[in-house]
Image (cartoon, rainbow, N blue to C red):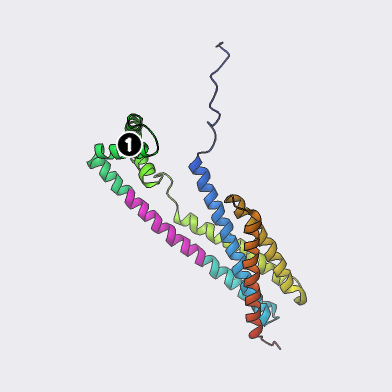
């Protein structure tokens, strides 16, 4: 090797960690599903009200109320859910930390056993467990035993804001689509916009989940169309005549 030559750098050195990619994909998938919920929920509300009344202000009021209530409900539910998960993870980490303090040898043998189950030889598993424990025992045990990264616990507030934003963006589509056109085209314009939005969210969610696109899109559109059809005729049953 000459003085100007340098050892080849590993090709994957600057690539993102697999867990980081998976986490980002999960967040993106949750955002798409949140937007999908916003589209379907608010479309059902505004189309139902449009079936009962031609009053634009009544439709807008119902749609905005549905957007706000749905977004806050999604955010609150996500906050509670992730807070519970985070509390559970913290409790598991505290217990693991205590076990590492009181019985480190047993914990190291347990870690080695996990790597043996994954296919390593007993000798190599013991060596890996020992070296990882010497470097950062809690981190090693948390990932192998609990499937938790102590440095990347999910934030309840981040999850809540993401859900609120995703739902609101989705809900704006049917709300704008039904409020802007003239009365005769109002419901049809909303239906067309909703179908387009659901086709997009179905496509994206299918690609993120490596599923069949056609089936996901058809399922999405079918659910949205059925929701609008049912709520529209429920609205028709309670038609309001405005003076």
Q: Quadrant of the C terminus?
A: bottom right
Magenta residues: mostly which secondary structure? Answer: helix
Image coordinates of residue 105 in percent, x first then y, are 25, 36
Examine the image and state in which quarter residue 114 appears: top left
Residue underneath mark 1: 112
Of 6 and 228, nearer the camera is 228
Q: Is residue 86 magenta?
A: yes
Of 94 and 110, nearer the camera is 110
Of 1 and 80, nearer the camera is 1
Q: Residues within 10 Å of mark 1 (few under 14, many from 20)?
A: many
Q: Quadrant of the N terminus?
A: top right
Residue beneath the point at 73% across and 69% down: 189
Q: Is residue 131 above or below residue 71?
A: above
Residue beneath the point at 63% across and 71% down: 226
Image coordinates of residue 161 in percent, x first then y, are 52, 58
The residue segment tinted magenta is: 73-92
Q: Is residue 201 visible?
A: no
Image coordinates of residue 103 in percent, x first then y, are 23, 40
Residue extending farthest to the left is 102
Secondary structure beneath dot 1 equals helix
Q: Is residue 92 visible?
A: yes
Of 227 and 242, nearer the camera is 227
Q: Is residue 3 above or below residue 203?
A: above
Residue 64 is left or right of residue 113, and the answer is right
Residue beneath the point at 51% across and 66% down: 72
């Amino acid at each position: 090797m000459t003085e100007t030559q340098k050892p080849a750098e590993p090709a994957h050195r600057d690539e993102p960690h697999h867990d980081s990619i998976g986490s980002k994909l999960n967040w993106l998938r949750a955002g798409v599903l949140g937007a999908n919920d916003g589209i379907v929920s608010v479309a059902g509300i505004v189309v139902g009200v449009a079936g009962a009344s031609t009053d634009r202000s009544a439709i807008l009021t119902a749609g905005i109320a549905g957007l706000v209530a749905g977004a806050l409900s999604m955010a609150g539910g996500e906050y509670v859910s992730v807070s519970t998960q985070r509390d559970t993870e913290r409790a598991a980490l505290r217990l693991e930390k205590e076990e590492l303090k009181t019985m480190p040898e047993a914990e190291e043998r347990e870690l080695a056993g996990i790597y043996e189950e994954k296919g390593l030889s007993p000798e190599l598993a013991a060596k890996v467990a020992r070296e990882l424990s010497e470097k950062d025992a809690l981190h090693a045990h948390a990932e192998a035993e609990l499937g938790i990264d102590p440095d990347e616990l999910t934030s309840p507030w981040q999850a809540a804001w993401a859900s609120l934003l995703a739902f609101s963006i989705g809900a704006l589509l049917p709300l704008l689509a039904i409020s802007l056109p003239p009365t005769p085209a109002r419901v049809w314009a909303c239906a067309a916009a909703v179908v387009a939005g659901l086709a997009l969210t179905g496509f994206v969610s299918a690609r993120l989940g490596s599923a069949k696109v056609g089936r996901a899109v058809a399922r999405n559109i079918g659910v949205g169309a059925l929701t609008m059809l049912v709520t529209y005729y429920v609205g028709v049953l309670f038609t309001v005549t405005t003076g």
